Image (spheres, rainbow, N blue to C red):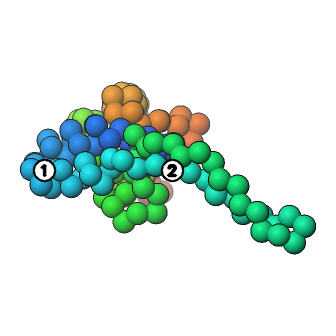
Amino acid sequence: MGIFLDLSKAFDCLSHGLILTKLSALGFEGIALSWFDSYLSGRDQMVDITQTVNGKSVTTRSDKLSMNRGVPQGSVLGPVLFVLFTADFPAYTGPSCNTIMYADDTVLITASRDTEELEVQSYIALNLAVEYCCMNDLVFNESKTKQLNFGARREE
């Protein structure tokens, strides 16, 4: 059985403090950790909207807001930071399932010939995944999470 998890706004939710804590746990220290801190800190965001009114270009700009969560959108480093941030996820879900991850796409794979055992394994794996999301400020989107059942071809 495959459970395809959906995380809402995965790159926007990451706490900068938690990113740095996890990078430190992975062995980043000294200058490297300071570089990541500098990369994430002191960022502001704003919105510019340019429109043409009566033949003139008019720009409206929002106030700047300080960023204390998330990674810069469209950056090469964003997906890398997310992968490093969630590197502990497979160990957290335990031996009852295999985990396949690509950036913010995650699939939990459970297998058993016994239907009841499969239900229990997938239930445990999904609950551990939800718990992990809560502990790491990730938003688990239940309505977009899908289950896919696999079976062996039966000889007739």
Q: Quadrant of the N terminus?
A: top left
Is disc 2 placed on a helix, strand or loop? strand
Residue 58 vs 43, above or below: the answer is: below
Say which residue appears at 77% left-offset and 68% top-offset: 57
Q: Name the amino acid type tagged 1.
A: Phe
Mark on residue 45?
2
Residue behind mark 1 = 28
Say which residue appears at 30% left-offset and 54% top-offset: 39
Q: Relative to residue 142, is residue 18 drawn left or right?
A: left
Query: Is residue 122 something that shows in the picture?
Result: no
Residue 135 or 12: which is nearer the viewer?
12
Q: CA separation, marks 2 and 1?
A: 27 Å
Say which residue appears at 12% left-offset and 54% top-offset: 31
Callout 1 crowding tier (Cα within 10 Å): few <14, some 14–19, many ≥20: some
Residue 113 or 103: which is nearer the viewer?
103
Is disc 1 placed on a helix, strand or loop? loop
Residue 129 vs 101, above or below: the answer is: above
**Residue 73 x, y percent position in the rendering:** 46, 57
Callout 2 crowding tier (Cα within 10 Å): few <14, some 14–19, many ≥20: few
How many numbered markers are drawn?
2
- Is label 2 or label 1 in front? 2
Q: Relative to residue 75, is residue 29 drawn left or right?
A: left
Q: Relative to residue 19, is residue 11 drawn left or right?
A: right
**Residue 34 x, y percent position in the rendering:** 18, 50
Mark on residue 129?
none
Q: Of callouts 2 and 1, which one flags the residue occurring earlier in the amino acid sequence?
A: 1
Residue 36 or 8: which is nearer the viewer?
36
Query: Is residue 139 something that shows in the picture?
Result: yes
Say which residue appears at 33% left-offset and 47% top-offset: 41
